[in-house]
Amino acid sequence: MTTVVVKKGIAMIEFFNALADPSNRFLQLSIIMGGLASISFGIIGTFVTTKRIGYLAGAISHSVFGGIGLALYLQVQIGLTWVNPILGAVLAAVLSALIVGFVSIYAKEREDTIIGTLWAVGMAIGILFVDKTPGYFNLASYLFGDILLISTSDLVFVICLDIFVVGICIIFFNRFFGVCFDTEFTGLRGVNTSFFYLLLLILTALTVVLMVRIVGIVLVIALLTIPPAIASFYARRLWQMMVYSILFCILFTWTGLGISYSFSLSSGPTIIVLSGAVYLALLIIHNLFK
């Protein structure tokens, strides 16, 4: 047991040494990315968890693969070099968010069927486009994420997204609060709840695209919901829940990255397993001592 602990300690020391090495630019970018991305994750994840629309986020995340596949096809087969997978993912995510939103608002009796269809068809379309695109593509990085592949342009995207998300949520905080907790009463007070619900889904879609780069399409729901779920044990107000969610997300992302690098594991699944284990442990403790 002592030997295992020592080996783990040595591995983590090696990670910190690698992080301090200027030549490991990719590792430094990953740490910065994890911290910045946690801002959007924590804020939007709080709304998603409170509104209980994790299944909608799941449908959006899987439909993103259709946009990625189409972008790769247009880029390689058609020659539109300016079309990149992130652009395709953003367009697919926003379109899916609007479809899911309108279905949720106007066709509740068929909501689950249409969302399930969108979930599956989005993935299928992406695979078909990849099949018709010449060359080799590392699809695992999209399905399960790889934060070590982060580039400077990704950092620019996440900074812009953080500014946009924080700004929108500060300006319309009370309206989002009303939509999440009591849509009918908020509507009676003259607030266009449908508009703000769709806006929330669009913000969720943009955040999902960012998450795909870190934990992948398959695991995106976990990182969107687990930190807010843990934060709910300790927070008494919605803004507190957001702050705690951001901090937990940073903790899981950075710690998971360190563990995955030290033990040669996939970063996305490591982050999710770590966050899930902490959530289950705290859930048990919370239920035992509440």
Image (cartoon, helix red, strand yellow):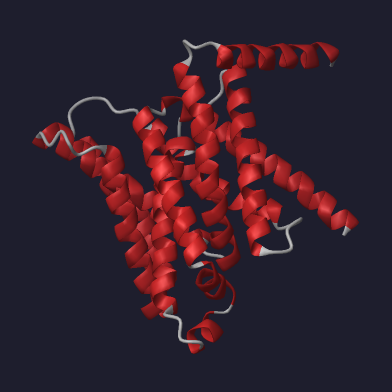
Q: Give the residue drawn at x 55%, y 54%.
A: 43
Residue 132 in view of the camera: no
- Horizontally, is 217 left or right of 1 in the view? left
The extreme bottom residue here reads 188
Q: Give the residue drawn at x 44%, y 49%.
A: 163
Q: Position of residue 130 (x, y in %)?
A: 24, 37
Q: Position of residue 54 (x, y in %)?
A: 52, 59
Placement of the N terminus among the 4 image quadrants:
top right
From the viewer's perspective, is residue 280 above or below residue 110?
above
Q: Nearer the viewer, residue 244 or 97?
A: 244
Q: Position of residue 168 (x, y in %)?
A: 45, 60
- Horizontally, is 163 left or right of 80 in the view? right
Q: Nearer the viewer, residue 274 or 234?
A: 234
The extreme left residue here reads 78
Number of marks in the image?
0
From the viewer's perspective, is residue 156 above or below residue 233?
above
Placement of the C terminus among the 4 image quadrants:
bottom right
Q: Nearer the viewer, residue 233 or 274?
A: 233
From the viewer's perspective, is residue 125 above or below residue 46?
above
The extreme right residue here reads 289
Residue 100 in view of the camera: yes
Q: Position of residue 59 (x, y in %)?
A: 41, 57
